[in-house]
Structure formats: C-alpha cells, structure tokens
Image (cartoon, helix red, strand yellow):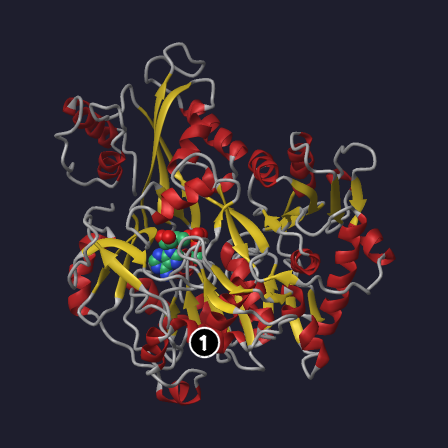
Amino acid sequence: MATGDSREDRLDALLEETRVFAPPAAFAAAANVRDPEVYERAAADPAAFWAEQAAGLRWMRPYTDVLAGAVPHVRWFAGGRLNVADNCVDRHCEGPRRNKAALLWVAESGETRTITYQQLQREVARCANVLRSLGVRRGDRVGIYMGMVPEAVVAMLACARIGAPHTVVFGGFSAEALRERLVDAQCKVLITQDGAYRRGNVVALLQNAASAVRGAPPVERVLVLRRIGAPALAAELPAGMQVDWQQAMADASTDCPCEPMDSEDVLYILYTSGTTGKPKGIVHTTAGYLLGVATTHRWIFDLKEDDVYWCTADIGWVTGHSYVLYGPLCNGATTVLYEGTPDYPGRDRHWRIVEELGVNVYYTAPTTIRTFMRWGPQEPAHADLSSLRLLGSVGEPINPEAWMWYHEHIGGGRCPIVDTWWQTETGMIMITPLPGIVPTKPGSATRPFPAVGAEVLDERGLPVGPGAGGNLVLTQPWPAMARTIFGDDERFVRQYWSRYSGKYLTGDGARVDADGYFWLLGRVDDVMNVSGHRLSTYEIESALVDHASVAEAAVIGRFDAVKGQAIAAFVTLKETGSGGVGGAGTDGLKADLKQHVGRKIGPIARPDDIFFTAELPKTRSGKIMRRLLRDIAEGRALGDTTTLADPAVVQSLKEQYEEAGEGAD
Ligand code: WTA
C-alpha cells in the first residue's frame, strides 16, 4: 500500500537522516570542473559565462549579442550563424576524431555496429541529399518515427544539416498520436522504418505510419528504412509516396554543404504532454540549444576524450535528443545506442553491454533503477562493471532507496551519482551536482547549474524558507530554453511565463533545505510521470470519453513503487452504453477501455486500474477534484472536502473502491 509513502510525507524524516556523499578524492582530482568558485563567477555575469562557453562552438558568422530581448521572447547569440550538424559531425572529421567512434550501436539481436565520425559525416550528407531530393527545403518540417537505430540519428542530423526542423515521435506512440503531431507540425516528409525490434517481437512502425499519413495531408513522401525486411510489414501507401531508404541512400552523393543557420532558427519541435488534451510542440532553436546541451554534457558527465558514454533514453524523448545525440556529438564523444529493452534476452542485458563496450558513464531513469532493484543484485553482480566512473539519473525524483542501490550495486560504491532535473521545455539540465565539486545527498538534485537561477516560491510569489514547499521557478533566461509552443505562442506565454512576472513556471513542486539543496516533489499540475514518460491526465480522459460507453472519466497518477506513478481511471458509463448501465461495468469493458486508450495514444498511456462509478466528486462549479481521487487511490484519509457539491459522493466512492480491492498493491 502507498499509505504515508508519498515523497512529501517522507521528506521531513529524510532531510534529518540524510547522508552526504562527498566527491571521491580521485574523481575530484581529475574532474573537468574543479573550482567551486565557478558558481559565483557565473552568477555575477551569466552572459559572460555563456559567451566563454560559446567560443567552443564553430561559428560560420560571429554573433553580435549574447542575449537580446526580454523573457520570454529572448534571442541568444543574435546575429550569429552556425550549423548543428557541422558542429556535431563535420568539424570532428577535420582532426584526430575523424576515426573515433561516434556511435556504438547494439542491436537487440546482439549485432553491433561502430560508426566513426567520418562514416557518420558521409551518411548524414547522403541523407540530407535524399531529403532535398524529396523536396525538403530549409524551414520545412520532417517527421521521424523510428526505433533506436543509427539511421534515426542520421535522419535527425540530416535535417539539421539542411535547416529542416525535425519532429521526432516516439515509436511507442499510436498511429493517431503520430497523425496529430504530423498535422500540427505540418510535416512534409515522414521518415520511418518497416518495423522495430522490441523484446524479440516486431513493432509494425510502417503500418502505423501509413495509417497516420492517410489523415495527414501535409505529408507528401514517406522514407522507409528496411530494418526487418519482412514482406508482412509492407503497408499500403499511395503510388509514388513511399521511398526506400537503402535505395535512395545508395544513389545519393556525399557532397552536401551545411546550411548556414541563424542562431535563432528552429532546430526541432518536440511534442510533450501539458495540462490539456492537446500535446504541445515545444520549439528549440539552434545556437543556444546546442551550447546548453554541449556545456552541461561536458561538465555534468565529466566527459573525457576516450569515454564510452551511454544514456539509455529513447531518441523519441528530449533526453534522447539532448543527451544521446546533440550534447555528446557536439562534444565529440562516443555515444552508445541500444535498440532493445533491459530484459531481453536476459535481465542483465545492460550490464553485459557495459562490460562489453567498457561503458564509463551511464545515465538512466529512476523507474529503470527500481526495476533493476526488483530483479535483484545478482544480475549486475555477474558482470564486470569496473569501467563505470559516473552514474546519472533523470526523469522523476529518485527515491533515496533507489539512489543507494544504484550507488552500491551499479556504482560499486565508487561512482558519483548526478541526479539531473530538467524538462523538455528547458532543453538542458538545470539542477544537478557537478560531480567533482558538489557533495550529493540521495534524493536531492542538489543545486542549479552555474548561470542558472532557480527559486521556490509560494502562492504570493515570495521565496519560501528552508524546508518549506512551493513552486519551482527559473529566474533567468538560459540558452537552451524553449522559445515557444509551435503555432500557439499565446499558450506558451500563459502557461509558463504569466504566473510570476518574468519567471518561468516549471509545474514542479520543490523544497530547498538549509544547505540550499533542491528536493523535487513531482508535478503540481495535471501532468503524470509514468515510468519516466510524461503524460497528461486530460489526454487519457479524452481518449476514454471517446469510447462509446463512457460518459465521463477522471484520471490520476497514483503512487507506484516501480513506475513512480501508475494510471488510475475513474469512469462513469453512459446509461445506455454497450458495456453496462449507470456505473456497472464488466471486466470485459475494462479490458476494452484499456485497449482503446492504447490505440488512441499508445501502450504507455494504458490505464493500470479502471474503476467504474456512478458519480465523480466535483466542486460546485463542476470541476472534478482529482486530489481526492488521488487520496482514494493511494489509500489515504480524504483531504479537505468542503468545496464539494456533494461530500457524500466521495465517501461512498472511497468505500466502494476499498471494497473492490482496487488500487496500489
Ligand atoms: C520530472 C525529462 C525530479 C519533472 C528530462 C519534470 C524530475 C518532468 C527529474 C519533465 C529529476 C525530470 N528529479 N523530477 N531529476 N527529471 N523530472 O519533459 O517533473 O519528459 O517537470 O523531461 O520530469 O519531463 P520531460
């Protein structure tokens, strides 16, 4: 049961008993960043700090201003020109990194491929020419719907090379979710693959893609990588629409100069869940984004020239964009891509990869760590993990138990752990230790990165005192910040920049302890975090209500020991629905509803629990009180019910829920 187990409840006890882990002496002595005064220097003149870092990029034309304009509509490195693919690939080919591995790819089958910077350069240039031959011009959007294959990286960099913003849609999303994004971003071309391997099965990406583009008129051509090569994966597309990746690449020239892009040109759009049913297309631009991810990657992961670096995130999420691809490659690193899941063919798969490739830096999500915990320490114990030097965590607050397990069983007690807080919107890591100088406390993301300003504010906008909870805000512009929501700048301003004047509202709750350490408390809005995937309660509610039998639905994230949050749906049925009458649903209908949500959004959004109820607790103005539903699902005493239209509804709901044995187990 989850009773009393929420992070809020436990934090008081935690803050008292917390252990502090100083950076190990040998690590600190060799760290990239060793001078603690960097924080003061950066705070005194953030623009100078970023300008100093910007000298590490290759510019085609120097910028005139580090920062121009006022938040939220700032311009970083205005007047400058550069190209992201040039910085991530071409410039490394002009020196000793030419034959260095850029990508180490491990297929789910065990096949491996090493792609050097020079090989990557040629592939990217070829793919850029293919895109041009399909009619893609500077500024046109390109959708990418692929698995973890090197060609996904090639495709993204090819877009950057010709100045065509990409929109990567996670391969676990459904055809409908893909269509919605392709239409919103008005993508001209979609790049996909026939199928993707996942846990020994094949995910039919092309068939999803084909069904998505049927309702997405802006998409003119679909470029298809043959990953599997099975005829059964073929899809019906209008004549001339489908282009074969292998064929087109074989015919393409490797001569393709990089397009000189303005600092503020759009690099990509990435959709993420917000507090409404409609996903937001977060817009990132060129120079500031690249600088932000490259600097944070080098400093936080203490990147060394010969490191093998592995961030386990999928390329379809922002972590994949910033810390599998753009940050590492801009720094000339060797970055690992793994196609499959951690439990295929065995539960030691990650540790086998660490051993075989000699991985030095490993960056993953708390939900994955908790899964490893559940599988037991014997899995990593069988592998030689002595190459590991540094560990990272991202995606949700890491519970101290998981932190300690990670430290002990993966890090062998010797590797610092960087718990990195950030968001799709921030583009880069914002709150994190610098591993050579900042002592860590299990469960705390520690302090803002140099030149980053963060505060915890109360409802009136005043900073809360040590230990008190409030809204986490970012107080000064940073280079990788989102510039807008694609096609909806008004929503961008309203959602992030209007609650506290001049400050960015993160949507996360936090506390700051007496040492100035930040403790993240999770979302304070209707965004859920399920296994590190960001999902909106409204999005899932809309999908449920779309089902013929459903009258109304309320979705909440309830505590789950492995996934962080699990999805619980409270559903009211139509009086004359197919599955039941006035609140009585069947198990068959439950299964059907889960499947329906999977079809509408993707398997990741499928509710864990569905509970049928005749009524939902609402305020007098008709707003569903999700907070009370969370209390019910987590087995807590009910919070304040005085604003309810009918307090009896929630009490009887609680009783029925407990009787049905629903909820956390
Ligand atoms: C949560 C993923 C606590 C947070 C990079 C944020 C975290 C949301 C951490 C963004 C962390 C991410 N500690 N919470 N280290 N990292 N979060 O956009 O709630 O997928 O707002 O970006 O994840 O999720 P997103």
Residue 471, given in percent of the width and then of the height, sits at 26, 52
Q: In the rendered view, tell whether residue 195 sits above or below residue 312.
A: above
Label 1 Cα crowd, 10 Å radius (few <14 / some 14-19 / many 20+) = some
Q: Amino acid at mark 1?
A: Trp
The total of numbered circles placed on residues is: 1
Q: Is residue 602 left or right of residue 256?
A: left
Q: Residue at x 40, y 67 (%)?
A: 377
Locate residue 468: give its quadrant. Answer: bottom left
Q: Is residue 521 visible?
A: yes
Q: Quadrant of the C terminus?
A: top left
| Residue visible at 79% across and 38% down in the picture | 241
Question: In this view of the protein, which residue sits in the foreground, 76 or 233?
Answer: 76
Residue 294 image offset from top left, x and y in percent: 52, 70
Residue depicted at 48% across the width and 80% down the height = 386
Camera-nearest residue between 581 and 363? 363
Image point 55% across, 57% down: which residue?
Answer: 285
In the figure, is residue 249 to the left or right of 642? right
Q: Element at badge 1?
A: helix
Q: Position of residue 592 (x, y in %)?
A: 48, 26
215 shown above or below 369: above
Q: Quadrant of the N terminus?
A: top left
Can residue 346 be seen here? The reply is: no
Ligand 1 lies under 8 Å from the Cβ of mark 1: no
Q: Write down the residue under mark 1.
A: 299
What x and y, as percent, mark residue 353?
A: 57, 69
Q: Quadrant of ligand 1?
A: bottom left
Query: To which quarter of the image does residue 410 belong?
Result: bottom left
Residue furthest to the top: 576
